[in-house]
Structures are given as structure tokens and as C-alpha cells.
Image (cartoon, rainbow, N blue to C red):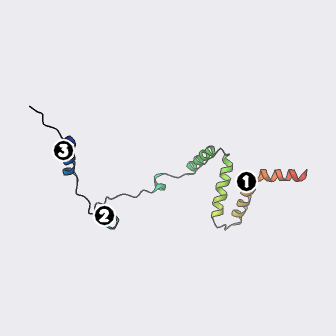
């Protein structure tokens, strides 16, 4: 007796077609309003992490080591950038900014002064 020939792939294809959900209507998908919305709570990144002076200090030390810079150089840069973004209202802010600029470039100034003295 001859065996019945199996058509496994055809059978699988028919089964999958019968199980498939209805196709979305053709047309512009983005112009149709959404049907199944899920309520999602918006996360606030700053609320998840308690910012503190100690945490900022640790981050500053870590970034300085990654960039292979002395921590004080990174601190000078950070303070200068913050001051330059703000409106300088008090003379102390202007003085601090000038001191930071001096401290950031003191070695270059000293080198230039030594060259000029020679």
C-alpha cells in the first residue's frame, strides 16, 4: 500500500493563516487615531536620584579620572561655564570668574613671563 504524501509546509501555512489576526485596513497608519492606549507614568529623572553635594563631588572626581585631568582643573572649568551662562549680578561673581580664568591659565602666563624676562 502506498503511503500518503505529506504536505507539512502547506498545512503549516494554512494553519498560520487561520490563526493570523485581521489585517489592518490599508491606508495611512499615522492618520488613524490609536485604539489601544496604555496609561504610563512619566518618570522624572531628577526625582529618581537624590542630588547632593556629596554625589556631585563624587561625580566630579570620577569624571576627572576618566578624562585624566586633575580634579581642580575640571572644577575650574565647571564653575567658569556655570558663571558664563548666568547673568553676573554681583561684583563677587565677576571677581570669581576673573580668578577662575587666571587659575585656568596661570601656567601659560608664568611661562610667558619667564620668556619675557630672559
Residue behind mark 1: 104
Whether residue 7 sits left or right of residue 105 in the image: it is left
Q: Nearer the viewer, residue 73 or 18?
A: 18
- Residue 58, given in percent of the width and then of the height, sits at 58, 46
Q: Which of label 2 and label 3 is nearer to you?
A: 3
**Residue shown at the point (22%, 57%) measured from the top left:** 22
**Residue shown at the point (22%, 47%) measured from the top left:** 13
**Residue shown at the point (64%, 67%) measured from the top left:** 87
- Residue 60, given in percent of the width and then of the height, sits at 61, 48
Distance between the alpha carbons at the discs numbered 3 and 1: 76 Å
Mark 3 or mark 1: name the one nearer the start of the chain.
3
Question: What number is the disc on residue 34?
Answer: 2
Q: Which of label 3 and label 1 is nearer to you?
A: 3
Mark 2 or mark 3: name the one nearer the start of the chain.
3
- How many numbered callouts? 3
Q: Are marks 1 and 2 in contact (CB under 8 Å)?
A: no
Whether residue 83 sits left or right of residue 52 in the image: it is right
Distance between the alpha carbons at the discs numbered 1 and 2: 55 Å
Mark 1 or mark 2: name the one nearer the start of the chain.
2
Q: Nearer the viewer, residue 26 or 115?
A: 26
Q: Nearer the viewer, residue 20 or 61?
A: 20
Q: Are marks 3 and 1 in contact (CB under 8 Å)?
A: no
Whether residue 35 sits left or right of residue 50 in the image: it is left
Distance between the alpha carbons at the discs numbered 2 and 3: 35 Å
- Residue 62, given in percent of the width and then of the height, sits at 59, 45
Badge 1 marks a residue whose secondary structure is helix
Characterize the local packing of mark 2: few (<14), some (14-19) or many (20 or more) Cα atoms within 10 angstroms: few
Q: Residue furthest front?
A: 2
Q: Which of label 1 and label 2 is nearer to you?
A: 2
Residue behind mark 3: 11
Characterize the local packing of mark 1: few (<14), some (14-19) or many (20 or more) Cα atoms within 10 angstroms: some
**Residue shown at the point (32%, 64%) measured from the top left:** 29
Amino acid at each position: 500500500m502506498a503511503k500518503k504524501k505529506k504536505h507539512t509546509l502547506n498545512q503549516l501555512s494554512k494553519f498560520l493563516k487561520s490563526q493570523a489576526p485581521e489585517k489592518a485596513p490599508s491606508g495611512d497608519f499615522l492618520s488613524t487615531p490609536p485604539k489601544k492606549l496604555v496609561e504610563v507614568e512619566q518618570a522624572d529623572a531628577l526625582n529618581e536620584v537624590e542630588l547632593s553635594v556629596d554625589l556631585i563631588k563624587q561625580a566630579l572626581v570620577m569624571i576627572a579620572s576618566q578624562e585624566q585631568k586633575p580634579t581642580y582643573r575640571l572644577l575650574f572649568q565647571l564653575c567658569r561655564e556655570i558663571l558664563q551662562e548666568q547673568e553676573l549680578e554681583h561684583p563677587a561673581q565677576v571677581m570669581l570668574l576673573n580668578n577662575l580664568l587666571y587659575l585656568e591659565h596661570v601656567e601659560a602666563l608664568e611661562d610667558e613671563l619667564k620668556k619675557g624676562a630672559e
